[in-house]
Amino acid sequence: MIYTATHEMLPRQNADELARQSFVLSLKRHVMGRLYGQAGEIYAKEAEPAFVDTFGHKPENASEAEQALDMTLPYRFTKSINRTSQEMMWQSVGETVYREADRITAAAERLAADNAAGGSLNLDPLFQPDQVYRDVHIHLQPEGYCPDDDGSSVTVGALYESGGRLYSMGRGMRKDDSKAGAVLRWLEENRPGWVPQTIFDMGCSAGGASTVYAEKYPDARVSACDLGASMLRYAHARAESSGVPVHFYQCDAAHSPFEDESFDLIVSHNLFHEISTEKRMEIAHESLRLLKPGGICIHQDVDLLFRDKSPWEEAVASYDLHYNNEPFWLTYAKSDFGQELRSSGFDEKYVREARIARTSGPGHWYAFIAEKPE
């Protein structure tokens, strides 16, 4: 496994760990490719006929389609091996992260003290994230996003980045794919020559996208926020080790500490499938409040929305809610953030949605885009 982005904070596998992670990667590619690729055929040939034989009618919604699929052995096996592969992923990645914990913790402390790149870390010891992020280990990640903080831990960020790299490659994305890169390419095509001076990355997690914007726009001030201290401590050290200044804040993205009209560009990456409808609507209002005239917000997420999908496709997409600790997965799938942006006060003429191609590998991301006119 060769990755384009390397830095001091990234946990380093030994030979045995690399071999185990390579096996998990191959297994995930098989599950997400060949096994799930057969779901439509399984539904047509086995699931729907079995459901009709039992209930006297075809499945009429996603719930009934999922019940039909679960009547078949191949689909039950696919779900089972998918869950197993996710657990194996975290076990294999965790072996590296926890073995490397002392080294990366020391590196984070040194990088933060040196502050050579000029970024900052602004933690709030009184901040309390929503209970769901303390209780639920999203996508089964060990420790979750917001464990109790010991004042020095960086393992949450290390797990997030290491697991995310392995997971995304298992989903068919190539090593040089970047969500931020896809947004930057869209900006180059749709706002040629435009250079933002202030950028806000909402829900930055381990800071991977934040550093991409700082590298692309070296004269801009890049701010980023997330909920957990361990995640942000890692993100800050990661940015410093990459040689770019990013200013990290521990806060709710929907209630940030910045003044009105502070940013030219607001972005988020894969945030919406992790938040409630109420929080998503607050993000719309916050985006409008924080954008400068002439600014733009681009909120990118997975292309999951239940638009023109059949009941069996919705049923397959429901897996992550039930088995991968994604409590807001279907909340996002059924949402209409474009309308929420308009309801928050954005002019309808300046709100759009787009599928933006990944920078490498198959498929697209989905983006909600809103501009504040001059």
Image (cartoon, rainbow, N blue to C red):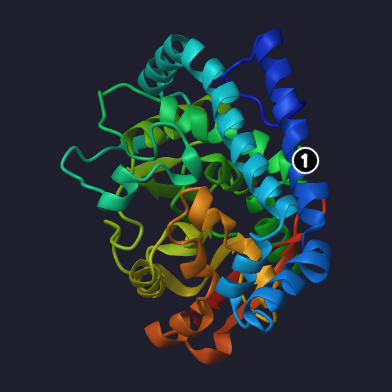
Query: In the picture, residue 42 is in which quadrant?
Result: bottom right
Q: Where 64 falls versus 217 (above or below)? A: below
Left/right of residue 348 with respect to residue 236 in the rendered view: right
* Residue 201 drawn at (x, y percent): 47, 53
The residue closer to the viewer here, 372 or 94, is 94
Given the image, on which type of amino acid does mark 1 rest?
A: Arg
Indicate the secondary structure of the residue bearing disc 1: helix
Q: Nearer the viewer, residue 34 or 369?
A: 34
In this picture, residue 2 sits left or right of residue 92: right
Q: Residue at x 33, y 63 (%)?
A: 254
Residue at the (80%, 41%) spot, across then down: 30
Residue 251 on image: x %, y %: 29, 50
Residue occupying the point 46% across, 40% down: 246
> Which residue is under mark 1?
29
The x, y position of residue 174, in whole percent, is 78, 42
Q: Does the image show residue 91?
A: yes
Q: Is residue 192 visible?
A: no
Where 29 sits versus 220, above or below? Answer: above
